[in-house]
Image (cartoon, helix red, strand yellow):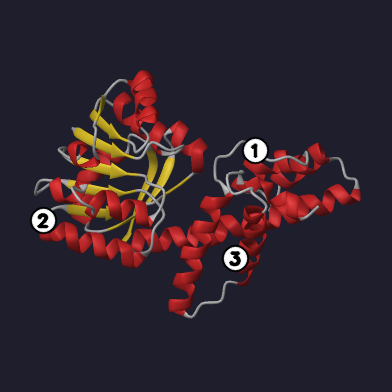
Amino acid sequence: MRVAFLGLGQMGFPMAGHLMRHGHDVTVYNRTLAKAVLWQEHYGGRIAATAAQAAAADMVCMCLADISVTREILLGKGGALTQMRPQTILIDHATGTPDFAREIFAEAAKRGIGFLDAPVTGGVPGASAGTLGIMAGGDAAIIAQATPVLRSYARQISHMGAAGAGHMTKLVNVICGIGMGQAVAEAIAFARRAGLDMDRLIEILMAGSSRSYVLEHKGPAMAAGKHLPAQFTVDLALNNIRQTLAEAVRLQAKLPLLEMAGAFYTEIQRNGGGALDSSSLISQLE
């Protein structure tokens, strides 16, 4: 299948690579051309000069930085959505909001294009291994058509409901992931002050009810008083937190833990650490 992939960040770069490995005819677009050239050197495929040029495909997948970038690339002057043909499929893998998903769904429907809001979970390790989880909103028939392609980089694909349900599910995932990150950072800072053997501590926590993705992937760095090379950055964490808190206001839901974590990340960002990995949260607790 002819597949376009828009956005070659830390997630999109390997995701587009898995499409090539699974035999698809892939064209990529990235706002920074050098990144697209590097991707082509790794995987082959083609580079498009514009998102609209790339969109001449059977399926267009996106993993872009935020809603404003996605809207500009899709609906701006010469945007990708305006150039897509009827009966093709558009998939948004970034974290967004339900309202944004419904907006794009409606714009796509006017053109006879199927749209899925299909954010992912599993982080950079999952993208690199091709084992992501996808939470999809949209029509069941479109998900069925897209699934063989999505299997290139996803281990689990769950249909969560109509347009917007995928992004809503991802906001729930943000609450869980950020909350666990806050808990792990607090626990490790506490343990370090107590003088515990940190290697043994991680082992015993991973053997019991405290086991989590965050503890497994970020706990050892935090235990050493360090942070990982940037994967899920403070800037991205804050973007996700703000989107989730805005939706919470609409739902009249209380998210005190997420608000507290947001305050810690905001302080890191103010001190120039926006590009640091979220594991740098340990620095605010020690």
Query: How far apart are the alpha carbons under marks 3 and 1?
Result: 22 Å
Q: Earlier in the sequence, mark 1 or mark 2?
A: 2
**Quarter of the rendering containing residue 105:** bottom left
Circle 1 residues within 10 Å: few <14, some 14–19, many ≥20: some
Residue 117 shows up from this direction: no
Q: Secondary structure at mark 3?
A: helix
Query: How far apart are the alpha carbons under marks 1 and 2?
Result: 44 Å
In the displayed structure, 92 sits above or below 137; it is above
Q: Nearer the viewer, residue 70 or 105?
A: 70
Q: Are marks 1 and 2 in contact (CB under 8 Å)?
A: no
Q: Nearer the viewer, residue 187 or 46?
A: 46
Circle 3 residues within 10 Å: few <14, some 14–19, many ≥20: many
Q: Nearer the viewer, residue 181 or 201?
A: 181
Q: What amino acid is at disc 3?
A: Leu
Q: Which mark is residue 228?
A: 1
Residue extending furthest right?
195
Q: Secondary structure at mark 2?
A: loop
Q: Secondary structure at mark 1?
A: loop
Q: What amino acid is at disc 2?
A: Arg
Q: Residue under circle 2?
A: 111
Query: How far apart are the alpha carbons under marks 3 and 2?
Result: 38 Å
Q: Residue under circle 3?
A: 258
Q: Position of residue 9 (x, y in %)?
A: 43, 38
Is 263 on the left or on the right of 135, as rendered? Answer: right
Residue extending furthest bottom?
252
In the displayed structure, 19 sits above or below 189; it is above
